[in-house]
Image: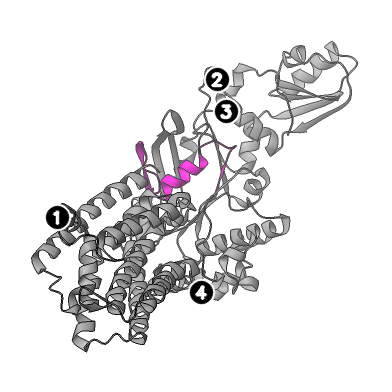
């Protein structure tokens, strides 16, 4: 994505960054996963800033956001690998450490390789033996597509194969909550499809799933709910359709050579304007006003298209910098 | 043992690790045949040289075995495996215990191999002497098992080789595993404060040496064990708190 955003209207933008709490109150009934006022800093980097998330048992939730949004830090706190500076995490009514001890959580971390000197089957069997109610090892090997190299030593696997084994390790736990941090990062297109097919089956079995991703399509296609994070905050929370609706309602695309992007973005109803070669793209909060004014001020505009914003536009809109004076930071 | 399957695979991994086998079994055995074999008619301290050297190599080989078993934690930490384990129901103490068990099993194998090698060079001991020697060696190894876990949290994979080599060599030389370092004076007094000295003496306990004065040996081993364990706990806490 090589878009350059030249201007943003300040009005409107703030609306999108409101933490979304109240409309999620319906999810607070069962003892699912509850994160309240959760914060975590690494030195001067505010990785996670007072987020509130409540996830019902059985939901599949995507944590979506660019690198540095705080997704991994949030996941580490849910797994009990990182201690929050403030706030609490509750997993099925107990703290993460207790949930881990009783085998309620299966997880796939973003980094980490497999231990050596074991075959894939031995490794999956070893991990399964640690859990009170593990899934059948052969079944997991077959579902995760690792059966065909189950007798190979772990150090002789390709990156994609190792990734699938790591998924098998998470899955074999047979846990009530499955947490996956960038699960498809090393997979090719076909493996990615296999992976999500397996995940659908797991989700259908009632397992609560939280996965972090920066692939919009994955979040859109596989999650019941998308939690969009940026700079350590939750910037949007809801079904994919709602997230799309939150960003500029429509975009106007027109061919307009040598356009002045500055004056385009100042048009009424326009949030931002980009130049893409000879075309301009206007992200609008009120496309009707914008279009009237566009035709009046720029009569040379032609090939005009008006369409609803896709998730990609929503993503960029909602995760763009909100304040000029916001510290520059990178979270894990 | 709460997780027998886990322990079984840990042991399997240990014995499949060729480098580990080479250092804990291969090197002591090689040195024993090279030096013990060429001096098989000689005597040292009134003891036949092969017997003397067999006990020295036994203390060195078993020490390397238990230290490096714990020190392998460093690699598992570095490539993220311990984080994966921390989100399973396996308790940290059980993880450490498995490392100690693997180290001890490797040490036992090292002893069996060296005893067989000794026998092939004419070493003859009574059943009681073999057993006493073995039991005392296993006790003398306790502080080194703890040291391994400590090093596993201090070292990185890159520094592992030199640090392990240096540590075990220093302990072995000062403890007298490769021949007596001092028989009197200040050096002997200092050396007697090392657990490796008592590990070597444990090996010689069955040789008619009055080499294992119970109290002093127990005290040194206990102090080192407790001290190293406290350090290990501190380093472990620092390591996990960072996350």
- The residue shown at (40%, 74%) is B29
> What segment carries the magenta color?
A62-90
Residue A78 part of the magenta segment:
yes
Q: Secondary structure at mark 4?
A: loop
Q: On the image, numbered disc 3 is attached to which residue? A: A16
Q: Name the chain under label 4.
A: A
Using the rendered image of the protein, determine whether residue B1 is visible from the camera's viewpoint.
no
Q: Earlier in the sequence, mark 4 or mark 2?
A: 4
Front: mark 1 or 2: 1
Which of the 4 image quarters holds residue B152? bottom left
Q: Position of residue B178 (x, y in %)?
A: 31, 66
Question: Quick check: do tags 1 and 4 share a chain?
Answer: no
Residue A157 image label: none
Are the residues at dot 3 and dot 4 in contact (C-beta closer than 8 Å)?
no
Q: Residue lying at the far front in this picture: please name it.
A: B42
Q: Position of residue A141 (x, y in %)?
A: 58, 71
């Amino acid at each position: 994505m090589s878009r350059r955003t030249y201007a943003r209207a300040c009005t409107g933008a703030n609306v999108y960054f409101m933490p979304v709490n109240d409309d999620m109150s319906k999810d607070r009934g069962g003892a699912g996963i509850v994160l309240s006022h959760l914060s975590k800093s690494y030195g001067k980097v505010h990785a996670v800033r007072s987020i509130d998330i409540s996830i019902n048992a059985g939901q599949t939730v995507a944590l979506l956001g660019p690198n540095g949004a705080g997704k991994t830090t949030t996941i580490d706190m849910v797994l009990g690998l990182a201690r929050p500076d403030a706030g609490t995490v509750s997993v099925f009514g107990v703290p993460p450490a207790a949930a881990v001890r009783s085998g309620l959580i299966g997880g796939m971390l973003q980094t980490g390789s497999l231990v050596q000197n074991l075959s894939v089957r031995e490794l999956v069997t070893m991990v399964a033996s640690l859990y009170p109610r593990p899934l059948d090892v052969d079944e997991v090997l077959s579902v995760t597509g690792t059966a065909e190299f189950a007798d190979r030593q772990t150090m002789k696997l390709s990156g994609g194969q190792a990734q699938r084994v790591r998924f098998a390790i998470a899955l074999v736990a047979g846990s009530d909550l499955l947490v996956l941090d960038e699960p498809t990062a090393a997979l090719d297109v076909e493996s990615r499809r296999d992976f999500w097919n397996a995940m659908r089956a797991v989700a259908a079995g009632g397992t609560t799933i939280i996965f972090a991703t920066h692939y919009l399509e994955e979040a859109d296609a596989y999650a019941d709910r998308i939690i969009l994070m940026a700079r350590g905050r939750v910037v949007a929370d809801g079904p994919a359709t709602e997230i799309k609706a939150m960003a500029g309602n429509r975009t106007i695309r027109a061919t307009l050579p040598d356009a002045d992007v500055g004056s385009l973005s100042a048009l009424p109803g326009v949030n931002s304007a980009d130049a893409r070669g000879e075309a301009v793209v206007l992200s609008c909060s009120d496309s009707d006003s914008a279009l009237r004014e566009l035709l009046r001020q720029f009569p040379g505009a032609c090939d005009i298209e008006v369409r609803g914003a896709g998730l990609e536009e929503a993503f960029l809109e909602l995760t763009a910098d909100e304040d000029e004076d916001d510290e520059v930071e990178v979270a894990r | 043992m709460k997780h027998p399957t886990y322990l079984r695979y840990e042991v399997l991994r240990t014995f499949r690790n060729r480098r580990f086998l080479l250092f804990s079994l291969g090197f002591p055995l090689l040195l024993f045949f090279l030096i013990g074999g060429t001096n098989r008619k000689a005597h040292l301290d009134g003891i036949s040289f092969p017997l003397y050297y067999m006990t020295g190599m036994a203390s060195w080989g078993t020490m390397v075995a238990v230290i490096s078993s714990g020190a392998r934690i460093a690699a598992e930490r570095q490539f993220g495996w311990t984080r994966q384990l921390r989100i399973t129901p396996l308790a940290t103490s059980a993880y450490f215990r498995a490392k100690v068990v693997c180290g001890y099993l490797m040490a036992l194998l090292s002893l069996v191999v060296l005893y067989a090698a000794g026998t092939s060079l004419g070493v003859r001991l009574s059943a009681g002497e073999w057993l006493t020697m073995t039991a005392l060696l296993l006790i003398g190894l306790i502080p080194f098992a703890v040291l391994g876990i400590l090093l596993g949290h201090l070292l990185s994979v890159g520094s592992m080789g030199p640090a392990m080599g240096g540590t075990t060599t220093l302990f072995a030389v000062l403890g007298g595993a490769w021949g007596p370092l001092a028989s009197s004076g200040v050096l002997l007094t200092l050396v007697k404060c090392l657990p490796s000295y008592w590990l070597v003496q444990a090996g010689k306990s069955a040789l008619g040496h009055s080499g294992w004065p119970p109290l002093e040996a127990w005290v040194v081993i206990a102090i080192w064990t407790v001290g190293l364990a406290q350090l290990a706990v501190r380093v472990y806490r620092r390591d996990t708190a960072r996350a």
